[in-house]
Amino acid sequence: MKVILLKDVDELGEQYDVINVSDGYSRNYLFPRNLAILATEAALAQNEKRLGKITEEKTKKKQAAVEQAEVIGKLTLKLLVDAGEGGKLFGAVTAQDIAEALRTQANMDMEKRKIHINAPIKMVGTHQVTIKLHTNVVGNLSLAVERKKE
C-alpha cells in the first residue's frame, strides 16, 4: 500500500515521503497514530506542492545536523559517577545522563532517544556513543567515565 508520511517515522522515512508499506502495518500502526495517509491522487498532488518548500527546509536541517555531528565528533564529555575500587559502576550510565552532560558541558540540547549506547556502560573508562542527528547523519561522541573522588 502506498502512503504519505505525515511525521518522521524511525527506520521508515521522513515527513511527506511517499513509501510502500504492508496493508496491515498501515491500517494497524500508521493510520491510527496519524503518522500517514493513503496516497490518493489528490493527496499526492497536494504533497507535491508542499515538497518544494519542504525540500529546502530538509536540506537546511540536514546541513545543520552535519555541522553538529562535526562538533560532537570533537567533543569528549566527562562523567563523574559512583564506582567501586575495581572501576565497576554502581548502576550504569544512561542516555539521560549523557543528554544532561551534553546540556551542561557542551551547551547542546539533545533528546535522549537520539542517543544510542551500543552496550551498557558499567565500567570506568572511555566509551564511544552514537547520536543519531538526522536520518542519514550520525555523530560519534567520546565519553570519559571517571570515578568520583571521595
Image (cartoon, rainbow, N blue to C red):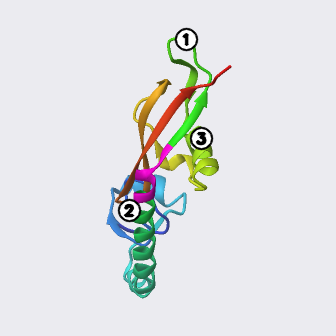
Q: Is residue 100 above or below residue 121?
A: below
Farthest top residue?
85
Secondary structure mostly seen in the magenta stretch: helix
Three-letter amino acid code at disc 2? Gly
N-terminal of the pair, mark 2 or mark 1, is 2
Residue at 45%, 58% (x, y): give it. 71
Above or below: residue 104 compared with residue 18: above
Q: What element carries label 1?
A: loop
Task: Find residue 15 and report its image quarter.
Answer: bottom left
SS of the residue under disc 2: loop
Q: Residue at x 45, y 27 (%)?
A: 125
How far across and down, in percent of the image, does residue 147 sit? Answer: 57, 24
| Highlighted range, magenta | 70-76
Circle 2: is it few (<14), some (14-19), or many (20+) Cα within 10 Å? some
Determine whether, in the image, residue 21 is placed left or right of residue 53.
left
Q: Nearer the viewer, mark 3 or mark 2?
A: 3
> Which residue does the numbered mark 2 point to in the structure image?
13
Of badges 3 and 1, nearer the viewer stands 1
Where does label 3 land, which residue?
96
Compute the Cα span from label 3 to label 2.
Answer: 25 Å
Which image quadrant: the C terminus? top right
Using the numbered discs, state the Cα–Cα distance from disc 2 to disc 1 in whole angstroms: 46 Å
Amino acid found under the numbered disc labelled 3: Gln
Mark 3 and mark 1: Cα distance apart in space: 25 Å
Callout 3 crowding tier (Cα within 10 Å): few <14, some 14–19, many ≥20: some
Circle number at residue 146: none
Mark number, residue 85: 1
Q: Considering only order in the chain, which callout, 2 or 3, is on the residue closer to the N terminus?
A: 2
Q: How crowded is mark 1: few (under 14 residues within 10 Å), some or many (20 or more)?
A: few
User: Element under label 3?
Assistant: helix
**Circle 2/circle 1 CB separation < 8 Å:** no
Residue 47 part of the magenta segment: no
